[in-house]
Image (cartoon, rainbow, N blue to C red):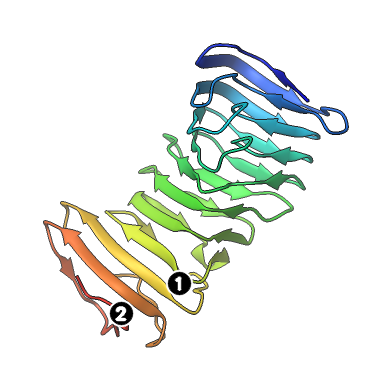
Amino acid sequence: IGLGLATGSATSIAGTLTINNTGSGKRVSLAATTSPTVAIGNLTVNGGEVNFTTGAGVPVVSVSGAVTLGGGTLAPVNGGTSATFNVGGNWVNNGGTFTPGTGTVTLNGSSAQTIDGSASTTFNNLTLNNSAGASLGQAETVNGTLMLATGSLSSAGNLTLGNGATISRDTGTLDAAPNFGTTANVNYTGATAVNTGYEIPASSTVLSNLTVNKSGGVTLTASPTVNGTLT
């Protein structure tokens, strides 16, 4: 049982949307199509369950301001697995649950962003695409791909990568080594030349596959051991 806020393929909320409770066994769905486009100023979930779509699909959701989880569950796709979730402000988790599926959260603000709060968040894919950078104020986890498109991810020592996770790097950087799982993959993409950094595991047993698909090239500043495939 749920409430759909829109019946078309696009939903736009200019201000702040706050969900305090949806009732037992109920939820709020922000659009009725399977792959909607949803634009919100700020999103706050304090209770209940919030979805971006009523069915399986790949919704594209853009929150220009902050996402705040005070309680309840934010599950982007009801019945599906993937969503594209763009966030222009801070991500604050003070006790809510984020169910990422196989989707991607992209930090794409124009000023420095934070992932913070009193509780940790587990992401599937997390992309940093903000030249002003972002910082981690809490222990966070990425189980899929961490994409460093542009900007610096600060306090990266607070980040844990799941076993088999991938770091894909264009020009973005880490200011410290994350906590790697037993295996990790590293991809270099884009055109701008870079020097290797903290994305390369220090342990000789962790780096599985290393892929260089960067026309500007990559300069090694360490001597990594590739245990899988070098491409």
Marks 2 and 1 sit apart, C-alpha to C-alpha, by 21 Å
Amino acid at pointer 2: Gly
Q: Where is 189 relative to 61, above or below? A: below
Give me the disc on residue 177: 1
Q: Residue at x 76, y 26 (%)?
A: 19
Q: Quadrant of residue 24?
A: top right
Give me the disc on residue 39: none
Q: Quadrant of the N terminus?
A: top right
Left or right: 96 in relation to 138: right
Residue with the mark numbered 2: 228
Res. 111 visible in picture: yes
Q: Where is 73 relative to 102, above or below? A: above
Among the two numbered marks 2 and 1 on one chain, the one whose residue lies closer to the N terminus = 1
Q: Where is residue 23? Give x, y as percent.
A: 87, 28
Badge 2 density bin: few <14, some 14–19, many ≥20, Cα 10 Å: few
Left or right: 4 in relation to 231: right
> In front here: 35 or 85?
35
Is disc 1 placed on a helix, strand or loop? loop
Q: Residue at x 26, y 76 (%)?
A: 229
Amino acid at pointer 1: Ala
Q: Where is 115 relative to 180, above or below? A: above
Is disc 2 placed on a helix, strand or loop? loop
